[in-house]
Structures are given as C-alpha cells and as structure tokens.
Image: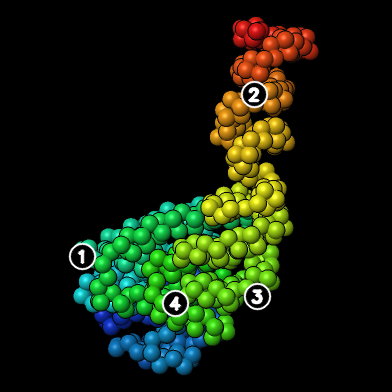
Amino acid sequence: MNINIAEVARTEEESIRDFMNTLGRQLDSSDPKIDETVRRAAFLVRQNYVKIKTYNTRTDTTVFTVRDASMANVNLTFNPISLSCSCGNHDFCRHTLAAIFSLYQYIDSLSTWLEQFRSNAQAKQLSLLTEDRTPETWLNFVQGIYKRNLYTQTNLNPYLLDSIFSDMIDQIYSQMPLEREWKPIYLVFMQVSLLSHTWKHFSQSKTEAAQSFYHNFIEDELEQLEDMLRDAKSNSRLFALDPFYNTLKDVAHYFLLNQHGFVENRIELYLLLWNHLFTSTKDREQELARLQTAHSYSDDLSIEQIKAIFLVMLDKTDELEAQMESMKVDDVLSWIELARTAGLNNQEAVRKQIIERIIPLLPEFINASLAPHFRMSFIKRFDEERQGVELSEAQEETLFAAYGKYGLQPFSNFLIRKKRYEEWAALHQLYPTSLAFLEICGLKTVLEEKPASLLPLYHSLVQVEIMQKTRQNYKTAVRLMKKMKSAAKKSGKNEFWNDYVATVRKNYKRMRALQEEIEKGNLML
C-alpha cells in the first residue's frame, strides 16, 4: 500500500522534534567530517533519493530506502527514536540523517535547522580563533568559510568568482588579530590557504575567455600577496609565530606539488614565500630535502627545476651547469623564476647565464607553447625580468624577433636607444596600432631626431582613416595629416608636402566631406 510520509511525520511530530534538538546539541558542527555528513544527507533529501518503504503503527517502526552510490535501508524506531543502517556504520551516517531529515521537512523548515547548525559551527570557530590560536584553528576557519561560500559551486560562472572570493576575504579580515605582530602573518596565512582551496575551481571552465579571466584574477591576488609578504618580512617575528610559519611551509609545499593547472602561477606563489618569508639556510635545506624525496606530484610540474631554484638560493650554483646545458622549451617558465630568484639572492652572473640560455628558446616557446591571450603579459613579465642584463646586439635582435607584435613597446625602445629610427617607423607600419600607442613607444623622440622617417608611417595611418568613409574618420585623417605636415616641415620637405596634399585631394575628389575637412585643416605649407 502507499504510505504518506507527511502523515507519518505529523503522527510522530513530538519525537521527531525532540530528536532533531538532540542532534543539534550532540553533533559537533565544527568537525569537518560531521559537517560533510550533514551536507550529504541534506543533498539526498533534496534530490528526493529517500523513500519510505514500510510503517508499522503497532511497533512504531519505519523502514526507509536511500538511493546513494549503493542502495541503503534505514530502520527507524520511534518513542524513543533509534536508527540503524544497512551500510554498517555504527555512528550517524548520511543515510540515517537523511531519513530523519526527510521526516522533519514535513513539520518544520529543514533549511532553517541546517542554517542554525552551521551558524553554531561558525560561532565555535570564531571563539577558537581567539581562545585557541593555533595553525589548526586558522586552517579550519578558512576551510569553513570556503565550504559555506564556494565548495558546492561546481558550475560557477567564472565572472562570479571574483566577488565570491572578495566576500570570503572580507569574512577572514573581520576576524583579524588585534596585535600588530600577528596581523602580517595572519593575512599571508589566510591568503595562501584560501587560494589553495579555490584553485580547483580554475579548471572548471576551459574556454579561452574563462582561462584569461582566471589568469588575470590570479595575477591580481599574487600582487596583493607580494605586498603582504613585504610587510611580514619587515615585521618583528615572535617565537609564538613559529608553528604558523611551519604550517605555512607545509601548505605551500602541498599547493605546489598537488594542485593542478596554471603551473607558472603556482611556482610564483611558492617562490614568493621562499624568497620573502622563509629565508634561512636551514629552512631552505630542509625544503630541498623534501623535494628530493618527493615521489608524487602534479604532472604539469618539473620538480627538477624547483630543486634547481633551491640550489641557487643555497649558493650551490656549480650544480646548475649541467641542467642549463639541457634546458628545454617546456622549462622556460621555471627557468625565468630561477633567474628571478638569482637576482633576489644577488647572483647576477647566474641570472645573466640563465637569461642568455632562455633567449634562443623564446621563438618556439611564445609561438607554440603560449596561448595568444597570454603572450603579451608573458613578454611584459620577461622583459622586466631581463632588465639589467647586458645583452649583445645579436641577442637583442633574437629576443625582439621572438616577441613579434606582442613586444612592440620594448622593441621600439631598443630601436630608439640604438638610433635606428627608420626601422622604428618600419616596425610600426608592419604592425599598425594607434597614435596613442605610437606616442607611448617614443613617437616624439623619432619626430625630433628623424622626422622624415615618419612620413610613410603617417601616410599609412591616414589611408586607414580615409577608407572608413565617415565624417569622424575624415577629421581624424586631417589631424594625422597635420602631424605629418609638422614632420615634413622639420625635415625640409615643403614641396613634397604640398604635392602630397594636392595628390590626396585629387585622388579623393568625389569625397566631399573629406575635401571640406582638408580645406578647414589649412594643410598647405
């Protein structure tokens, strides 16, 4: 016969309410395992995976079937309530909790009960943060915030991640210690821990737009982390902070070796900590020993390159020679971090060697290994990193040829520095941009030093505007012609310029709006 679960719930309402109140008191809501069991039980109920099979009014017993990974049978006896499950778990399992939850939802709000249950956990965690200040309570606090806000977001729109992460950070900051000595390590500890929890969400969407967004998001967070580390580095360190530093080493080690994706950013975060916070020889030797015995790590990570970085930190650079000889395209990102580490450790000779070894690999790396939307940011980063390294002209030619259109600004600066103004103009004809970008790349310097070289470039820009065939574009074309007029005047090409204006007017005599703008521009010399 059909059994109405709502009628069963109303019949046994008093004992169900008493049992739920007892559950709220007995279950430790701050225990991650219990919290996970409660969450899964609620999921089973909401998915309608819990069905009532039998109800015996004489013996006050009910049998439920729970559809999980495997089917489970739950026996429930009322007055007083006792529960048992076929899964064999003697403690409260998700099946027994799902059975009682399925009854409770017909007499009261299950969502309200769950919200109260979790608020108890939050209150307990907050009290522990102040009463029992240990690395474990800090880790549990971050994990609790992550689970409440992001853990269940399996199909999250990438653009919502930023606001959710900011909300989690605000919750973390609201519990910041009052003592000045504790604030810097609290901020660093929480930022790294929360990023580690969030990392798995960066692989949920593989679209180019999502990956570009995640990349920019990570870059912004790492910049903030670097600022925090500078504050922590300049702050006095208490003995009471040692356990937190040791735990942070473990978190960073796990993060680098066991997370997946955005490997260059994982390495960057890891090295930020080791370059700014963990600077003692003893700490670095211990970490190198851990890396040498690591057998399980993400397949996108070159563990040998990370070991090499620690050899630089420990001034054991003689051991790097063989590795530099066998440098591969796939290792470029790791070697850039190694060059950066060498610079931070005042080993300029090693840094120069690494940069020189990287340059021949850049053409293949940029064009074959990097997605187009990452190329400009990579080139900007590498060009900043190689500053201060004296390169030969041939090496610089190779470098800028590898940059291609993504490295117009550094190549432009190089050409101006070498006074190769005709090549500067030719470069910008090959890769057309905008007048504003040309000015960033040194247009004014070229105009002062070699104005005649700009005439072909200006002409090509004018032609692009004219071919748009709108009044606004004609006005822009005339503004460019005025700049071209200035260049012609500076180079003593007055007759050429007047012939040029006459030719333009003749070629486009049917474009009345353009003729009007040229007339108003007073372009003749």
First in sequence: mark 4 vs mark 2: 4
Where does residue 308 sit, x and y in percent of width and height? 56, 73
The span from disc 4 to disc 2 (Cα, nearest Å) is: 56 Å
Foreground: disc 4 or disc 1: 4
First in sequence: mark 2 vs mark 3: 3
Residue 230 appears anywhere in the view: yes
Furthest residue in direction right, as rendered: 507
**Quarter of the rendering occupied by the C terminus:** top right
Foreground: disc 3 or disc 4: 3
Categorize mark 2 by other alpha carbons within 10 Å: few (<14), some (14-19), many (20+): many
The span from disc 2 to disc 1 (Cα, nearest Å) is: 62 Å
Foreground: disc 2 or disc 1: 2
The reply to whether discs 2 and 1 touch (Cβ–Cβ < 8 Å) is no
Residue 257 appears anywhere in the view: no
Where does residue 178 sit, x and y in percent of width and height? 21, 63
Q: Which residue is mark 3?
A: 322
How many labels were placed on the picture? 4
Foreground: disc 4 or disc 2: 2
Q: Secondary structure at mark 1?
A: loop
First in sequence: mark 3 vs mark 4: 4
Residue at x 56%, y 65% (from the top left corner): 350
Q: Which residue is mark 1?
A: 179
Question: Which quadrant of the figure has residue 77?
Answer: bottom left
Q: Secondary structure at mark 2?
A: helix
Q: Secondary structure at mark 3?
A: helix
Q: Which residue is mark 2?
A: 451
First in sequence: mark 4 vs mark 1: 1
Categorize mark 3 by other alpha carbons within 10 Å: few (<14), some (14-19), many (20+): few
The span from disc 2 to disc 3 (Cα, nearest Å) is: 50 Å
Give whichever of 401, 368 is nearer the camera. Answer: 401
